Amino acid sequence: MGTELVRHCVKEEDMDISSIPPGFESLAPFTLRKVDNNRLMINQPSSVSESKSHGSQVETYIEGTEDGKMIKSLRRKPGINYGKYEKSSEDESEPDQNPFVRPSLPKGVIRGCEACLNCQRVTARWRPEEACRPDLEDAPVFYPTEEEFEDTLTYMASIRTKAEAYGICRIVPPASWKPPCPLKEKYIWENSKFATRIQRIDKLQNRNSMRKMWKVNHHKKKKRRRCSKTGVDLGNGSVDIRTPDEAAIYEERFGFEPGPEFSLDAFQKYADDFKAQYFRQNEGQCEPSLENIEGEFWRMVEKPTEEIEVLYGADLETGVFGSGFPKHGHQVGSSDPKYVNAGWNLNNFPRLPGSVLTYESSDISGVLVPWLYIGMCFSSFCWHVEDHHLYSLNYMHFGAPKMWYGVPGADALKLEAAMRKHLPDLFEEQPDLLHKLVTQLSPSILKSEGVPVYQCVQNPGEFVLTFPRAYHAGFNCGFNCAEAVNVAPVDWLPHGQNAIELYREQGRKTSISHDKLLLGAARDAVKAHWELNLLRKNTSNNLRWKDVCGKDGILSKALKNRVEMERVRREFLCNSSQALKMESTFDATNERECSVCFFDLHLSAAGCHHCSPDKYACLSHAKQLCTCSWGAKFFLFRY
């Protein structure tokens, strides 16, 4: 009754929603000061008008994100510079100068000739009698009804308890789901070019550590008093000749070299030709089954007999090449609008209501902007987890099936331990090897080490969903095209917090600001709480927030844990005389990260009055920021 009386007196525009996220009010018992034109100013207590102003800015920010009116910066997530692995023709000019390099496998694929760079001759042959097909349990498959398929994130939440224990699952849309694919338009199909990478399938698991090979070769040369030159196997039969001084600091890394450019039309012909030649038998052409292809792929990975070189159009930016889904602003047919706005359209998926990626203003390519993957038979994606342990959704537009393998997020450490055990030299040389996406390990080996591995086969028109920190890998069974992007429902927040703490330990750069997403969600949850209780706005979006709040709500727990971590670090490090108010624009135009561990500094930062004004550290590395006296340090707090 009392609430009902209040409801008529409260106007939405007059609501005073605090700009400080819940839980942070008590973190500033002392008076904060701010830096203004190099002078220290006493910061007055926030007034009601300031809270309103800040609150309206938040709403404008959110509305701008949804309507697409906000100007966003396009940023590519930290990735691998595959170009640095390119081998020069000079390396291949004298392949026999080092007699101590282990003999290479015979070439199974010879690509290019004098007349054409993109032709190929496949001399390797399918060996079905030596197949190494893993014996694995299938990941679950879900068949949503038309009604269930309407709300993407709600459906994901409904299957999470069943599917998360497998790491991956397959989602088969209703029969009516048939989105048009702009990539099949004649002009794009025949004229738009994309770059490829060269993958050596025989070296995905069985390859020598570059550093170890140098040590062996250098030792042999010293014994034979031939120290003037040192050779290192570059993995493609070529030799890099260096002086002893150069070799001493030589740290070559294995990777995928850049390959030629193709149109979709040309690449389909190239891929089909490779598959036809590879699986040709004495009696003529043979169409292999999925089981045949899987057994042969893992035979080449585990027990290679030839060099097998394939091409993969991976991590292609849809903002450049184009998306396989129809988009706003593009010419679409009369039946397309429902697909343009659909939640399952991967261009919309990351910022759906209920995804905290809504609070990231930058269009981070590969995280918030989908990537395309154009594959051929045996082209592979190696074991990895998503950045920040996000969910990912992959949709196959057309082509041959894609084979997937997944490990539950709860068993991620088991997989990492097994890979270190079986590939010790590679991890000794490159401790962050799993971040590079260039290494496979057979599911059979993982299974023998007690790692649960599940498989699924993705067909055209189907989705594959991966869960937080779930390692996944796989390969393509022929020419195909898929698209993938990330999403972060509220239940991801604890996984995201674990990820950034892990990144801090590893000194790894972040792609997104976890604190920005968490605080954005907290503000919207408070707003939804007001609207539900005072204005009786029982909208689906407000009710969505209600489910994650409360004493045992996921958002409440995530925020409480983050506030406690921040409180402990602040009390341990600083006193009131060193605390300054962080400007709201501190990280508005560019990311601020710790100069020691790359931790995101959206919430707090440590600086020095005597050093460079643009150099900061997180609270955990304030003492390592510089060698200046502790009295010269200051701390910036957003709240």
Image: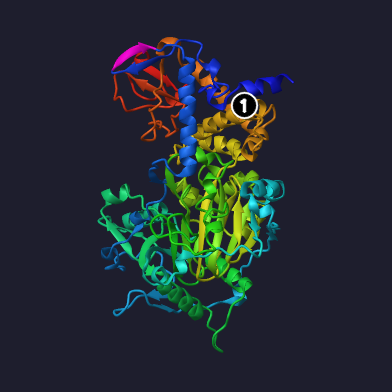
On screen, 70 above or below 481?
Answer: above
On screen, 584 above or below 335?
Answer: above
| Amino acid found under the numbered disc labelled 1 | Trp
Residue plotted at (49% across, 38% down): 63
In this figure, which residue is indicated by the disc labeled 1? 530
Q: Quarter-wise, where is residue 576 in the image?
A: top left
Residue plotted at (62% across, 20% down): 9
Residue at the bottom extreme, as displayed: 283
Residue at the right extreme, as displayed: 1
Residue plotted at (45% across, 15% down): 574
Look at the image and say whether residue 41 sits in the magenta stretch: yes
Residue 360 shows up from this direction? no
Q: Main secondary structure of the magenta part?
A: strand
Q: Residue 592 versus residue 428: which sits nearer the camera?
A: 592
- Residue 497 image position (x, y, % from top left): 55, 34
Q: Quarter-wise, where is residue 68 in the image?
A: top left
Residue 14 shows up from this direction? yes
Provide the residue span drawn in magenta.
Answer: 38-42
Residue plotted at (57% across, 54% down): 344
Q: Residue 278 versus residue 242: which sits nearer the camera?
A: 278
Q: Secondary structure at mark 1?
A: helix
